[in-house]
Image: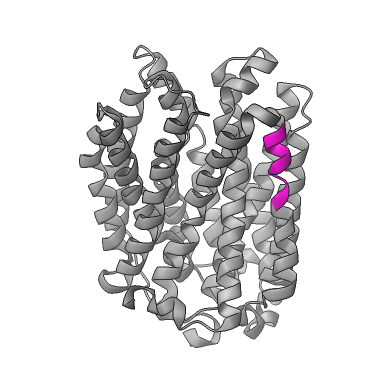
Amino acid sequence: MTFLAPLRELSHEQRHTVLASFLGWTLDAFDYFLLTFVVLGVAHEFHASKEAVTYGLFLTLAARPIGALIFGRLADRFGRRPILMLDVILFSVFELATAFSPSLTVLLVLRFLFGIGMGGEWGIGASLAMESIPAKSRGLVSGLLQSGYPCGFFLAALANWLLIDHIGWRGLFVVGALPALLVLYIRRKVPESPAWQANREAHRRVNVLDAMRGHWKLAIYLMLLMTAFNMFSHGSQDMYHTFEEVNLHLDTSSGTAFLLVALLNLGALVGGLCFGAWSERVGRRKAMIVAALLAIPVIPLWMYGGSLVLLAAGAFLIQVMVQGAWGVVPTHLNELSPDEVRGTLPGFAYQVGNLLAAGTATAQTWIADHHGGDFAFAMSAWIAVVAIVLALLLWLGPEARGIGFGRAAS
């Protein structure tokens, strides 16, 4: 298939790098989404409200910029590969510790620490992959990398469906420590970024403030853009399980609930790959704008389908659009970032966007509570408004499709 030709043209080492970056983001997302499936169970055990437990999601998202800055700067100074391994170990350790939380307060603290580890993974993994592959492969690989997020969502749904009745919510977080094994694969199969190696001394000499001179407007723009992107993604995913329980009256451990989540994530995978590849032909901004705006007419089917078949179609199509727009993000942010801070800026902008959007789940819960507990209304209104804002930000912003990295840039 010509669609997959850019992947077939990659070398053996490049394929290992792409796979490791994909798996890193997949397993990171898997660990994050486990909490979204057990909000009610945690609330019941600790005698707390659902809203109080959702602060765990807020704290995870809020901590991610800290991790992006710390680990991103380390990756710019000491290389993508060793810092990626360190980061994976740390977020896996905090995931495991969550399983043994004696109180809600301790659980919230551990989710904050987990967020620091999670914050470092995306930026390092994306820069390692993008700097290691040919420019013409970036669009499709970008979509593949970002598809790791819905794949992690799917694995979390699968684990919840198969295991929650046997091992409880604490057992799920023990399973969430397995990503630490990815370090063994990275150590054996993944080489360092050639672009970072070519500019090793420059990376170590230039501090982040000097490297960002003349690029602060770009950094602020990217942070605002990623705020809208994160409101788009989290607004369509984080409370979907609660929507299933409250509006559809489904048990989230049931086969029907799992089917809807599976189709939702299949749509995300299709959207990320298709729009990522399409961005090589039509440009990054155009591909993302089209995907964002096409989400709006899908909303009625997604939230108000009226039958399982229509709801399933809506779950699939909404994520084709949401994650279709997201599928272009890894390459878009890396192409816009200066060489000296490519390990730091894309991930930091992404995670600051997470910080500014961290209240999405709590805000949607508040809106639903003030409209008779109707999560369908809250999620529909949220996505419609955010899609328009996102399209406007993309239309106003820059693009650098196909730019060279490292020495290739000169």
- In the rendered image, is residue 342 in sight? no
Image: 207 above or below 162 = below
Residue positioned 67% across, 36% down in the render: 172
Residue 115 placement (x, y as % from top left): 65, 43
Judge left or right: residue 242 versus residue 37.
Answer: left
Quarter location, residue 297: top left
Residue positioned 41% across, 55% down in the render: 269
Q: Residue 55 magenta-drawn?
A: no
Segment tinted magenta in the rendering = 171-178
Image: 208 above or below 94 = below
Residue positioned 43% across, 79% down in the render: 135
Image: 124 above or below 36 = below
Residue 62 placement (x, y as % from top left): 59, 39
- Main SS of the magenta part reads helix
* Furthest-left residue in this view: 297
Which of these two is toward me, 21 or 408? 21
- In the rendered image, is residue 347 in sight? yes
Quarter location, residue 195: bottom right
Residue positioned 44% across, 59% down in the render: 217
Residue 71 placement (x, y as % from top left): 68, 58
Judge left or right: residue 93 versus residue 213.
Answer: right
Judge left or right: residue 273 versus residue 359.
Answer: left
Residue 396 placement (x, y as % from top left): 28, 57
Which color scheme did the rendering employ for the protein?
Answer: one colour
Image quadrant in which the N terminus is located:
bottom left
How many numbered dots are placed on residues in this image? Answer: 0
Which of these two is toward me, 282 or 394? 282
